[in-house]
Structure formats: structure tokens, C-alpha cells
Image (tube, grey):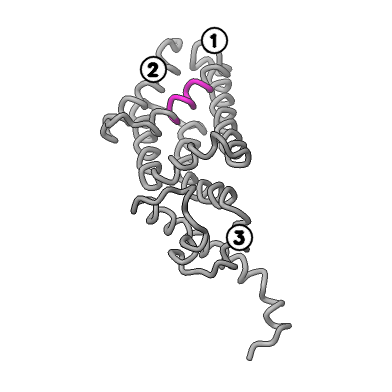
Amino acid sequence: MVSVTRMAKNAPARRDERREDVEERVLAAVDRLLAEGAVFTELPVQRIATESDIARSTFYRYFPDKSQLLIRMADLATDDLFRTAAQWWGGGEATEASAIDAMREMIAGFTRHRLLLEALVEVSGYDRDVGGYWRARVDAFVELVRRRLRELQSSGRISKDVDVHATAVVLTSMVERTIATRHRISDGRLAEALGRAIWLTIYGDAPS
């Protein structure tokens, strides 16, 4: 029988590993339930816990309420999506083709967790915590784009007439809304249109 002292000594490492495992299982469970037609706001905690193969008490240990659940699930679901975009905006030799590739990866990331992210957008409209989280996430990305545009402008690679803040807001909103709504456009065509729109907006009137 393992002693209480021994368990306490090893608790931090085990707790960190268990958190990651639990979060990934809950994310997969929520994705499955939504794909089966469940509505996130109507999903009972017990059903999520059962689908995740965890106890209800374990669920509440990591997620105090469903708002915090949605926020954490959105973090996990959008990590790759935002990382891909950040890499393209982060610097290096950008091309129209690379912009299209970045959009293709972002669309694929959104598609993997489409129903969860659609629930996030819906709930953010009336839940203060979820709305604040999503606005902060989008605002952080706007700031990333703004800084990159400022760098390009300072180095003479884009027109000095570009309003970097307004352009950052427009580009971020364009990508977010377009990917979320889709309008029955194929992933490939959507990626090409978005990548080209971004490229032309930034470099269309760049100095020769």
C-alpha cells in the first residue's frame, strides 16, 4: 500500500501529467458529442465526464464550470491554428504561396474542432468570461499583426501610407469571420482567396 507521504512527495509531477491527459480526453469527448448533434450549452457535466471516462469530481477539479471548460477547450483547439498564423506573421521571407499555405493550415485546424469553436463564438456573445477570453485572444493576434506591419513599413517593404493598426484589425477580422462562416466554399478555394487577399492588402502597393 502506498503511503500518504510518498503520494504527497510525487503529487506535483503526477498532477501535471494527469491534467494534460484529462484535458485531451475531455476535448476529444466534447468534439464527439457535438458531432453527434449535442448542443454545448445543453450538455450536462455528467455526460461530458462519462464520455471522457472520468469521474464528475475529477471534471470539477479542472473545470469549475462550463465557461472555464469552453475556454480551456478553445485554448487546446486553437493552439495549432494560432501558432501557424504567428509563424507566418513572425518574419522570414513571406510570399503569396506561403500566405496561402498558412491559411490552408489554419482552415484545417479550425475544421478539426469546428463545432467546438462555433460554440465558443456563440457563447462569447452572452457569457462575460468566454467573451472576454475570446476578445483578448483576438486582440493579442491583432497586436502581433500590427507589430509585423510596423516592422515591414519601417524597413520600406510596404507602403508608408498603410494604416498599420486599421489594417491589422481588418485582416484579423477577415480571417476569423471568413473561416468561421465558410459560405460552402471548399477549403482549397477558401485558402487561396484568403491568402491572396492578405498578400495584396499588405504588398499590393509596396515600393518596387
Residue 52 falls left or right of residue 195:
right
What SS does tag 2 mark? helix
Q: Nearer the viewer, mark 2 or mark 3?
A: 3
Q: Position of residue 124 (x, y in %)?
A: 54, 37
State the residue position of label 2.
200
Residue 188 belongs to magenta span: no
Q: Residue at x 40, y 47 (%)?
A: 113
Instruction: Pinpoint residue 144: horizontal percent, then vertical percent.
Output: 57, 30
Magenta range = 169-176
Q: Residue at x 55, y 66 (%)?
A: 56
Identify the amino acid type marked 1: Lys
Given contact means CB atoms under 8 Å apart, are the residues at marks 2 and 3 in contact? no
Write down the residue under mark 1.
160
As for residue 172 lying within the magenta part, the answer is yes
- Residue 199 placement, left or right of 58: left
Sequence-earlier tag: 1 or 3: 3
Residue 86 visible in image: yes
The amino acid at mark 2 is Leu
**Nearer-N-terminus badge (1/2):** 1
Where residue 19 appears, x then y in whole percent? 57, 63
Badge 1 marks a residue whose secondary structure is loop
Q: How many residues crowd around disc 3 within 10 Å: few (fewer than 14), some, or many (20 or more)?
A: some
